[in-house]
Image (tube, coloured by chain):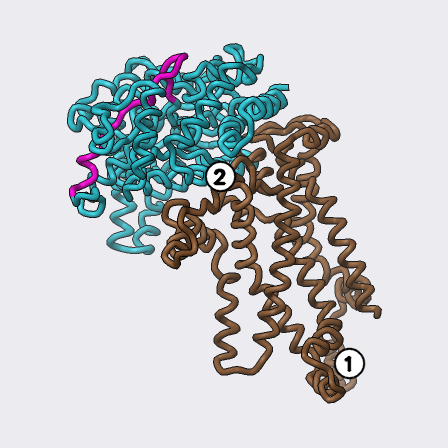
Chain colours: A cyan, B brown
């Protein structure tokens, strides 16, 4: 398609729009041209429905017109449920037609490596300009040779907890080790205020809690090379045994059936005292203080604080949800889409979106750690550094297809779930290790 | 111009023009082929092509965006050693068998009730269809809320009635989770049985019932010796359709449990989706899907043979 420069775009746009507005079809025919908006380049961007609705509003109401103004493109943003993006991506790749840019979650860029365009030029420049990428963003979006997408953000996960309830059982600050957390959780559960954690088949909350839990005890599915399966180890058995005890002592049993929104509802309804989540619980409670209140009738958001997951014998870990914009190989708008990616991820444009998130996501690059946003609200400040010790499934090996298969089959999650349901820890580990071995065979 | 000329001209003008196509279509064999063509194209495009494509995928090592190479039956052999697949096979059989028996029993019962004369009959018949009409995903979300571990309205009611004192973890307990998805499937499927069997019941001549009653047959005897044998062909067809649909069920389990907890509700279709779409391993996903085929084929052949036997008798 012929490239249209900005000046020409504006001229055409004015002529076409003016004709359409004043003279209808006859006037359009008289100018001899279709309106420019029908001629311009369109970039189709597929994303999830954001958990922060104001960000979607910003994209629709400000970013789309701005893209037309700055780049001369028509930006078509499609927002769908996060769970449906993979099905759409698969269909688009197989049929060779669909959105030009897809905002992927997790390590999906590695799964579609053969079908995405090389965006190294854009990603390298953004990384250089913005203080470099976090290891997790790089692990999911770079295959060691090239960038499979431009890292977009990291959805931060931290423990949202009820300050007053923790204080009532003697914890003036959030526990820093699993032993401390278990001791506090035991007291809370005895009072009918358990910890709430999903241990089910759902893409967000279960992995972001149980993978770091396993790592913090020294367990891992593979070694650093990603070739040797290491799951059947003493450390994993210890992690599973501890996980079962932690579950029985501290957690809400309903977590075995939770999806990613269940803990949000339970927390806001006052049935759980702590849960690993994005800042969405707090942000929603703050937006609707009259609706979400404590048992004393005060706004619940004033009683919420955030803290990272506790440390285990092998250290402190986290698993955050990375997002990456993939430019699809089948797209006929390669040049325009690359320009768009460089533009939307550039600091001034990204800044508006980052601000609208209110701390729900951190940037994929380190420059956003120093943003004034983190000083505005001390409650979301703990999310500022979540990108630093974040790792992806497959750690310490690569975040490759095998890691994705282990993740999407919920093998690690089910290892804990089976043990919680009564299977001996050793058997649960052996069975999970067998499954991981088959994937790596 | 002579009159004869005019007549001959008119005769020529009025004679139907018989093109080659018309002559061809007058041959019944060709006409049949032409009339069948749209159906053949539709079946070919939407059933045969995806099926053949699925078979081809299952014997390759294709992933999303990568066509792959022929690997023979390697994907199927791998499935035999896949413990999650074996759990999915067991679950699918239990799910289909239990749900079908319950749907048949409840559907037949409902059809017999609806076949009676009472006020508001038409309204009730329409109302009964509701679970079947509402989009499955929508109604399943309502059920998800009813089974919610924290906010379950079922638990609340049972608790208020003093029947339970703790919480029932409907979707969190492995056995209860399978029971729960079966309950929702039965709820959704009963109207299909009820309305189809009701249609069957209405084709039975009431005089047969009256004659049996005059001969002294009791209600149960009338049902067993008159109604049931006449209803059997319809019942078998309804069961056939239902078994196929239940066996390949996806959306209900996907929304309610995602196959969890710990694969307790994993079915063929959910596992195929998890592997094919979730992991991008299209070939293995296709193999899981196709593994359903022999089982379904056996079920369908047995049922069709039985239907033929019933009809011959």
The x and y percentages for residue A113 are 51, 23
Question: Any mark on residue B8, and which?
Answer: 1
**Residue A18 versus residue A45: which sits nearer the camera?**
A45
Circle 1 Cα neighbour tier, 10 Å, few/some/many (<14 / 14–19 / ≥20): few
Q: Calculate the distance from the C-alpha at mark 2 to the C-alpha at mark 1.
A: 68 Å
**Chain letter behind tag 2:** A
Q: Note whether A192 is above or below B139 in the view shown.
A: above
Q: Which mark is residue A88?
A: 2
- Residue B12: x and y in percent read 75, 76
Q: Residues within 10 Å of mark 2 (few under 14, many from 20)?
A: some
Q: Position of residue B33 (x, y in %)?
A: 76, 60
Q: Quadrant of residue A61?
A: top left
Q: Which segment is the magenta one? A: A298-318
- Do callouts 2 and 1 mark residues in contact (Cβ within 8 Å)? no
Q: Residue drawn at (16%, 24%), measured in percent from left and top?
A: A375
A350 with respect to A221 (left or right): left
Q: Quadrant of residue A38?
A: top left
Asked if residue B152 is positioned above or below residue A50 in the image, the reply reads below
Residue under the point 41% across and 18% down: A391
Nearer to the camera, B34 or B5: B34
- What is the chain letter for disc 1? B
Quadrant in which the C terminus of chain A appears? top right
Disc tally is: 2
Q: In which quarter of the image is residue A41?
A: top left
Does residue A105 show up? yes
> Secondary structure beneath disc 1?
helix
Residue A268 to residue A159: above or below: below
């Amino acid at each position: 398609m012929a490239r249209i420069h900005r000046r020409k775009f504006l001229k055409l746009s004015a002529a076409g729009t003016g004709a359409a507005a004043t003279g209808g079809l006859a006037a359009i025919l008289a100018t001899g041209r279709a309106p420019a908006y029908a001629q311009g380049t369109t970039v189709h961007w597929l994303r999830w429905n954001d958990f922060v609705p104001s960000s979607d509003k910003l994209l629709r109401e400000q970013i789309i017109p701005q893209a037309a103004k700055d780049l001369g493109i028509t930006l078509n943003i499609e927002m769908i449920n996060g769970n449906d993006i993979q099905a759409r991506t698969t269909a688009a790749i197989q049929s060779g037609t669909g959105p030009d840019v897809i905002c992927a979650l997790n390590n999906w860029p590695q799964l579609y490596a053969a079908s995405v365009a090389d965006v190294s030029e854009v990603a390298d420049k953004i990384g250089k300009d913005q203080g470099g990428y976090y290891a997790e963003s790089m692990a999911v979006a770079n295959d060691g040779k090239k960038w499979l997408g431009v890292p977009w953000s990291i959805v931060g996960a931290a423990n949202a907890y009820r300050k007053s309830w923790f204080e009532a059982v003697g914890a003036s600050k959030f526990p820093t080790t699993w032993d401390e957390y278990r001791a506090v959780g035991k007291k809370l559960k005895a009072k009918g205020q358990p910890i709430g954690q999903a241990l089910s088949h759902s893409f967000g909350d279960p992995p972001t809690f149980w993978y770091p839990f396993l790592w913090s005890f020294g367990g891992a599915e593979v070694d650093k090379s990603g070739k040797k399966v290491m799951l059947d180890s003493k450390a994993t058995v210890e992690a599973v045994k501890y996980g079962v005890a932690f579950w029985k002592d501290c957690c809400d049993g309903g977590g075995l059936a939770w999806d990613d929104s269940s803990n949000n509802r339970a927390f806001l309804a006052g049935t759980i005292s702590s849960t690993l989540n994005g800042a969405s619980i707090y942000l929603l409670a703050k937006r609707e203080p009259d609706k979400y209140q404590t048992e004393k009738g005060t706004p619940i958001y004033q009683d919420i604080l955030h803290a990272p997951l506790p440390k285990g014998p092998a250290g402190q870990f986290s698993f955050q949800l990375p997002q990456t914009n993939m430019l699809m190989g089948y797209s006929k708008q390669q040049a325009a889409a690359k320009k768009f990616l460089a533009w939307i991820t550039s600091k001034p444009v990204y800044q508006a979106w980052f601000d609208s998130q209110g701390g729900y996501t951190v940037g994929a690059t380190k420059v956003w750690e120093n943003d004034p946003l983190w000083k505005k609200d001390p409650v979301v400040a703990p999310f500022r550094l979540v990108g630093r010790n974040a790792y992806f499934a497959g750690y310490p090996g690569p975040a490759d297809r095998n890691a994705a298969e282990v993740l999407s089959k919920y093998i690690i999650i089910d290892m804990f779930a089976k043990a919680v349901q009564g299977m001996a820890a050793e058997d649960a580990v052996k069975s999970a290790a067998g499954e991981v071995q088959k994937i790596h065979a | 111009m002579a009159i004869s000329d005019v007549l001959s001209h008119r005769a020529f003008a009025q004679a139907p023009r018989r093109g080659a196509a018309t002559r061809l279509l007058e041959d019944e064999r060709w006409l049949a082929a032409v009339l069948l063509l749209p159906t053949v194209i539709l079946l070919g495009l939407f059933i045969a092509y995806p099926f053949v494509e699925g078979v081809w995928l299952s014997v390759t090592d294709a992933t999303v965006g990568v066509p792959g190479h022929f690997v023979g039956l390697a994907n199927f052999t791998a499935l035999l050693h896949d413990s999650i697949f074996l759990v999915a096979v067991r679950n699918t059989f239990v799910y289909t068998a239990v749900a079908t028996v319950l749907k048949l029993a409840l559907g037949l019962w409902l059809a017999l009730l609806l076949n009676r004369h009472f006020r508001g009959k038409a309204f009730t018949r329409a109302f009964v269809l509701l679970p079947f009409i509402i989009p499955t995903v929508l109604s399943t979300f309502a059920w998800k809320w009813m089974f919610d571990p924290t906010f379950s309205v079922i638990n609340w009611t049972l608790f208020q009635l003093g029947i339970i004192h703790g919480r029932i973890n409907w979707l969190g307990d492995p056995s209860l989770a399978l029971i729960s998805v079966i309950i929702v499937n039965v709820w959704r499927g009963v109207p299909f049985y009820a309305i189809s069997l009701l249609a069957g019941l209405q084709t039975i001549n009431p005089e047969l019932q009256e004659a049996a009653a005059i001969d002294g047959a009791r209600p149960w005897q009338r049902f067993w010796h008159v109604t049931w044998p006449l209803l059997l062909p319809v019942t078998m067809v309804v069961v056939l359709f239902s078994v196929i649909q239940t066996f390949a069920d996806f959306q209900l389990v996907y929304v309610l449990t995602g196959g969890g907890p710990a694969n307790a509700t994993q079915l063929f279709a959910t596992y195929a989706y998890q592997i094919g779409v979730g992991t991008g391993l299209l070939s293995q996903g296709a193999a899981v899907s196709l593994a359903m085929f022999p089982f379904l084929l056996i079920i369908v052949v047995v049922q069709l043979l039985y239907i033929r036997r019933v009809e011959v008798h």
